[in-house]
Amino acid sequence: MEIIWKNIEDKDTWNHEHSINLEYEVRLQVVKILIKEAEHLMDYLSLVVIEINSSNGYVSVHKETPEPLFSKIANNLEQPKAKKVSKVTSPLLAAINP
């Protein structure tokens, strides 16, 4: 599976931890959709292309994803729940930048 990140120039709204968590959540959701809808399509997971817009967190199936993968995923894909992103991501950074 390939993930395409859009609008990554807006670095103030996203931190690295949030990006990793979002990508993990999206990958897990796609795998679950394929297993539930048509387990035999898991063999074609490498053909799935997902697009994540970092400015608003919107996730969509990219048009390069072939059918029936595109339809099965697009019809069942849920947008990730927005999570509050803190400016300080670790206690170490908090100690360095009080």
Image (cartoon, rainbow, N blue to C red):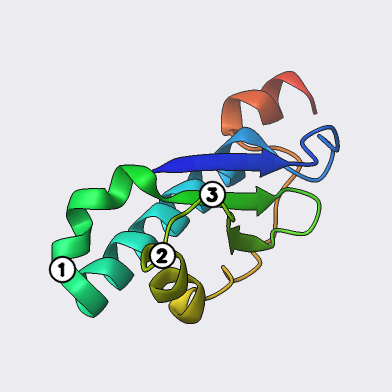
Of pointers 3 and 1, the one earlier in the residue sequence: 1
Q: Secondary structure at mark 2?
A: loop
Q: Residue furthest left?
A: 40
Residue shown at 27%/67% (left/top)?
34
Q: State whether residue 64 is above or below residue 60.
A: above
Image-based side of 15 in relation to 77, left or right: right
In the image, farthest residue toward the top: 96
User: Tag 3: residue type?
Assistant: Glu
| Viewer-nearest residue: 24 or 98 | 24
What's the CA distance linking mark 1 and mark 2? 15 Å
- Give left or right: position of 19 versus 8: left
Q: At 29% from the left edge and 50% from the top edge, which residue is drawn?
A: 45
| Mark 3 closeness class: few <14, some 14–19, many ≥20 residues within 10 Å | few
Could you say where residue 24 lies in the image, as x and y percent from the top left? 42, 49
Query: Dot 2, crowdedness within 10 Å: few (<14), some or many (≥20)?
Result: few
Three-letter code for the amino acid on which mark 2 is drawn: Glu
Q: Secondary structure at mark 3?
A: loop
